[in-house]
């Protein structure tokens, strides 16, 4: 990294490569705190500072919530803009990979509710997160705090030539409606992703794994073949669905109950991954779901009352 | 452009911000309260008006800037929010940053940068920076120079560009006086 005025950070390691630049884990030499610094190259921008950056950063500046990583600072040189974010050492993806599902189980409720609290804050400000996945959920084990991050590390959106009308590419946490070309998607898109994350915490593996099968086949095998009644989006891709055989929905509930998820949890999950985005539960309503009313939760849960405005 | 669509990850998903001028958006009372607090934080320094009146700050500078912004704004038929934002940026910047005296090109550069930033925040179509400089100005700046000034303004304003101006509140109050019916776009512009 080049020399920057007011640069008080020591680079620890590169943690990601986004579409617009690299992300580094750094140490603030003054406070000793870890931060994530996203470098955005602007030297080849022909029209001054690009509008996505002005609008994006100024929006991040206004977000202030316990369950969302803070944009701490913005530093600039003639060539780069550096976004300095709060950082926590562990992300949910690694947490799930490194632990057995039995040891994750007692933490699910507190993690899930904090994800939803952060998301409800985004949505109350009419903002979509758009890229929720386990690697964007950061965890501080000591304080049991969960924070949503968005460093744009993994997915790249906007594939130039979409030939199919069902987008297979992109994060496996993307909701089905957002994969349909030219369809509008909104806040339910994020709730779908939280549902996927929820299921992954319970089973230890992604609900829609990349690789073996395409996403639409996975949808069909999980829900049965969607009709335009169960999923308005089916209308747009009827040709594509036509090639899929009729099949019985998988009994996901049975599997999850077998993995130790309580019945209210199964009910909540089914409402989060409702195929029809208009009937999908909202983040705010999900927080009021009976699943979270369980007083025997093994963890203290200060996050319930933390919900609201800063 | 391809560049921008690729970055939908970073901003397009967020382009429905409540702080901007987006008709038909419901604003909750909680959000309104938060907006009112933020509005106070995003004003020029409190002594700004007095300094303009006393001549400590050259009010001619501001008037010339205002004139040019109005001209360019009308030329490109920008929305009311772009005008409010560009003047907010200009006033906030002038209230904390001392431009070198006697170099009128710096004022002009600042004015162009403020309008460009505001247009980029608000307008769906932003003219090229060279073309933005309408009205046969004395100096015409290259995009690279304007970028430097934009960065200085962004840094000085701590990247808090989502300001609340009267426009931000119109929706809410129009909805309120309208029996909680969403106002039509025309009534917003009439106001």
Image: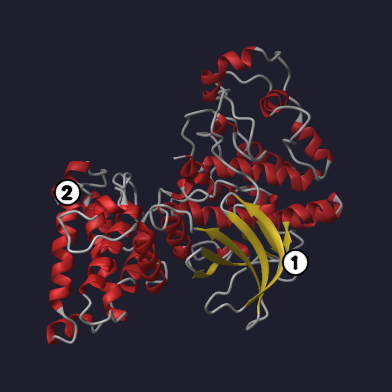
For disc 1, the marked residue is A141
Asked if residue B52 is positioned above or below residue A266 in the image, the reply reads below
Mark 2 and mark 1 in contact (Cβ < 8 Å)? no
On the same chain, marks 1 and 2? The answer is: no
Q: Is residue A117 left or right of residue B47?
A: right
Q: Position of residue A160 (x, y in %)?
A: 54, 33
- At 13% from the left and 63% from the top, the residue drawn is B67
Q: Which mark is residue B75?
A: 2
Q: Chain of mark 1?
A: A
Q: Is residue B177 left or right of residue A105?
A: left
- Mark 1 vs mark 2, CA separation in Å: 56 Å
Q: Which mark is residue A262?
A: none
Q: Is residue A231 left or right of residue B89?
A: right
Q: Position of residue B112 (x, y in %)?
A: 26, 62
- At 70% from the left and 61% from the top, the residue drawn is A14
Q: Is residue B72 left or right of residue A110?
A: left
Local crowd at mark 1 within 10 Å, few (<14), some, or many (≥20)? few
Task: Give the structural element (helix, strand or loop) at label 1.
Answer: loop
Nearer the observer, disc 1 or disc 2?
A: 2
Q: Chain of mark 2?
A: B
Local crowd at mark 2 within 10 Å, few (<14), some, or many (≥20)? few
- Identify the image quadrant of the N terminus of chain A: bottom right
Q: Position of residue B139 (x, y in %)?
A: 22, 63
Asked if residue A303 is positioned above or below residue B13 in the image, the reply reads below
Q: Position of residue B101 (x, y in %)?
A: 23, 82
- Seen from the viewer's position, the closer of residues B124 and A268 is B124
């Amino acid at each position: 990294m080049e020399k920057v005025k007011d640069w008080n950070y020591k680079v620890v390691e590169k943690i990601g490569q986004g579409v617009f630049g690299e992300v580094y884990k750094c140490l603030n030499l003054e406070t000793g705190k870890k931060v994530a610094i996203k470098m955005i190259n602007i030297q080849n921008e022909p029209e001054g500072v690009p509008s996505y950056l002005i609008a994006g950063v100024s929006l991040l500046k206004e977000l202030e919530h316990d369950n969302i990583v803070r944009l701490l600072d913005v530093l600039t040189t003639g060539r780069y803009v550096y976004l300095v974010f709060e950082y926590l050492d562990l992300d949910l993806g690694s947490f799930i990979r490194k632990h057995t599902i039995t040891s994750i189980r007692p933490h699910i409720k507190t993690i899930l509710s904090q994800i939803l609290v952060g998301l409800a804050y985004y949505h109350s400000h009419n903002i979509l997160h758009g890229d929720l996945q386990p690697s964007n959920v950061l965890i501080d084990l000591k304080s049991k705090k969960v924070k949503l991050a968005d460093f744009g590390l993994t997915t790249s959106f906007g594939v130039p030539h979409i030939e199919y009308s069902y987008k297979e590419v992109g994060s496996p946490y993307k909701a089905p409606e957002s994969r349909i070309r030219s369809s509008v998607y909104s806040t339910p898109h994020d709730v779908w992703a939280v549902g996927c994350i929820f299921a992954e915490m319970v089973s230890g593996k992604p609900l829609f794994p990349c690789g073996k099968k395409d996403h639409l086949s996975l949808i069909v095998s999980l829900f049965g073949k969607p009709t335009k009644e169960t999923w308005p989006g089916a209308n747009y891709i009827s040709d594509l669905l036509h090639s899929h055989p009729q099949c019985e929905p998988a009994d996901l509930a049975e599997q999850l109950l077998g993995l130790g998820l309580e019945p209210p949890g199964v009910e909540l999950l089914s409402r989060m991954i409702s195929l029809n985005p208009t009937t999908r539960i909202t983040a705010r309503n999900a927080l009021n779901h009976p699943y979270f009313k369980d007083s025997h939760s093994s963890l203290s849960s200060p996050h319930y009352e933390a919900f609201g405005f800063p | 452009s391809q560049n921008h669509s690729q970055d939908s990850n970073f901003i397009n998903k967020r382009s429905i911000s409540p702080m901007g001028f987006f008709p038909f958006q419901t604003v909750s009372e909680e959000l309104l309260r938060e907006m009112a607090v933020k509005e106070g934080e995003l004003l020029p320094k409190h002594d700004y008006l007095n300094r303009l009146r006393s001549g400590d700050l050259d009010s001619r500078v501001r008037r010339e800037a205002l004139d040019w912004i109005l001209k360019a704004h009308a030329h490109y038929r920008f929305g009311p929010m772009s005008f409010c934002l560009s003047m907010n940026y200009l006033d906030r910047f002038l209230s904390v940053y001392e431009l070198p005296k006697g170099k009128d090109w710096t004022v002009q550069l600042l004015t162009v940068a403020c309008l460009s930033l505001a247009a980029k925040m608000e307008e769906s179509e932003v003219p090229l920076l060279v073309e933005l400089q309408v009205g046969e100005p004395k100096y015409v700046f290259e995009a690279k120079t304007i970028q430097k000034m934009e960065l200085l303004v962004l840094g000085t304003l701590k990247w808090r560009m989502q300001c609340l101006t009267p426009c931000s509140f119109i929706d809410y109050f129009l909805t309120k006086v309208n029996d909680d019916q969403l106002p039509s776009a025309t009534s917003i512009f009439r106001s």
